[in-house]
Image: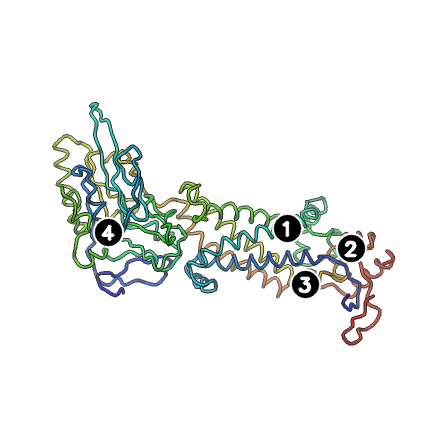
Amino acid sequence: MRRYEKVTTVDRYSTGDRINHWITAACLILLALSGFALFHPSLFFLTSLFGGGQWTRILHPYIGIVLVVSFLGLFLRFVWYNFPNLDDVRYLGRLRDAIAGNEERLPEVGRYNALQKIVFWGMATFITLLVISGLGLWDVYFASYLTIEQKRLCAVIHAVAAVGMVLTIILHVYAGIWVRGTVRAMTLGTVTGGWAWRHHRKWLRREVKSGKNVHAPSSAEPLGDRAMAE
Amino acid sequence: MASYQSLDLKRRSASTEQPPLARKYTEVAKLIDVSKCIGCKACQVACLQWNDLTEEVGVNVGVYDNPSDLTENSWTVMRYAEHVNGEGNLEWLIRKDGCMHCEDPGCLQACPSPGAIVQYTNGIVDFVQENCIGCGYCIKGCPFNIPRISHVDHKAYKCTLCSDRVSVGQAPACAKACPTQAIYFGSKEDMIEHAQGRIADLKDRGYQNAGLYDPEGVGGTHVMYVLHHADQPQLYHGLPKAPKIDEAVALWKGIFKPFSLGAIALTAVIAFVHYITNGPNESSDRDEENAERLAGRGKV
């Protein structure tokens, strides 16, 4: 059943994409909270959210495992749209306009712009580093596989990559708040035609050409509980 | 302040509160005179007995060391090293290994759990198991490879310097049990003075490089050795020559923590300022019309 829409809409994320995304997001929030709890003394109180210090130490790596599986799903879903191309170079050349929101002065953008691709590859890199170094710190299972010097290195890499990841997430979340109409892509799965026209026109043109994922505005107001479809 | 004045804390892991420092305490130290040790392991037995610990029955791995390494139960282990000196004679160097009770403890710096590692005003570094979360960071912080995580409760254990005995005026169990009095215990000042006498004696007997092991890199230690070859401490089963807290640990637990919290806060502030200066990035009705026209041409 299609939602009542006054304007043209375009499918952006399938139900599977959205579920996958929000599992990943939930894992990252839990990991950030439990990780920060052990990162700085002033944040140790966060261990209370997980049942104390010991439970925080026990749970954090398991949540990490769920994240890896979940993020791998997202990676495979979206990696094809995130390879860099010449549009990205042109886009980054006009970074100032991109940050100021002067999109009429930017080249037409495909499914993702250069900054979104940087966020994608940044997250993939940081998560890879976090997983590898995290296994090295998981003493319950892997204590005997590494030397103390290697574990010290793991601790530094884990901390640096975690901070990098948090900074990337802040950018990602802020972009979703700043660019209005974005969040619905991950809640409803669709964006408005105007949003696509303004931010991802090249992608919109492709979608229109293929015809499958573009929906005309609903023709009538919804009647009672029954939202009218097309 | 601790429950007992004799257990007042000087440092507490992962804590930023000011510990009580008004009173002046005597710093204690254990002095291990390696030149007097006969390797009888009475100290190991006394340690297990006093601390209610039982070591698993081990196997002979071809050397006298038994167990072959420190464990969560064996907080002290005799290390036997064979050394052929310049004259072609064999020297059997036996060192009682265990926590050195650093004045600047790497374990305490690395520990993320408030109060799991403490340093008393007398200098003893102690693990408080009820606060330990079992992360193993103390192992990474230690320049001497001393703490061990228990396979039973996943908490860290090491020599306490018998802080319970010391707090009521007793010497550590190992010192009490040593039959040759190779282990002394007292104020750090007295122990240094006593060591000087022993070193003079050893030099008299031909050990030109005899000296005291009280490494500066960790601010000195509350367990010190008299060594016949103080110029080559590595001879004594790899005793580090210039131990200090590793750069990686110092970076990770030092400057990086406030720096990264600052970077995160700054990023959030920049995002907020961007929002209140640029406003939201909204698509207009015209964008919607343009999209509709485009979609119309595409015959959707």
Q: Name the amino acid, label 3.
A: Thr
The mark nearer the N terminus, 3 or 1, is: 1
Q: Are marks 3 and 1 in contact (CB under 8 Å)?
A: no
Tell me the number on the disc at residue A204. 2
Which residue is more in the foreground, B80 or B110? B80
Asked whether the viewer can see residue A155, the reply is no
The answer for which chain carries disc 1 is A
C-alpha gap between disc 2 and disc 4: 72 Å
Q: Are marks 2 and 4 in contact (CB under 8 Å)?
A: no
Q: Are marks 2 and 3 in contact (CB under 8 Å)?
A: no
Q: Are marks 4 and 3 on the same chain?
A: no
* B246 left or right of B225 in image: right
C-alpha gap between disc 2 and disc 3: 19 Å
Q: Are marks 4 and 3 in contact (CB under 8 Å)?
A: no
The answer for which chain carries disc 4 is B
- The residue wearing badge 4 is B161
| Circle count | 4
For residue A13, above or below residue B94: below
- The residue wearing badge 3 is A187
**Residue B292 picture quarter:** bottom right
Which is closer to the viewer, label 2 or label 1? 1
C-alpha gap between disc 4 and disc 1: 52 Å
Which is closer to the viewer, label 2 or label 4? 4
Which residue is more in the foreground, A102 or B243? B243
Q: Quadrant of the C terminus of chain A?
A: bottom right
Q: Are marks 4 and 1 in contact (CB under 8 Å)?
A: no
Q: Quadrant of the N terminus of chain A?
A: bottom right
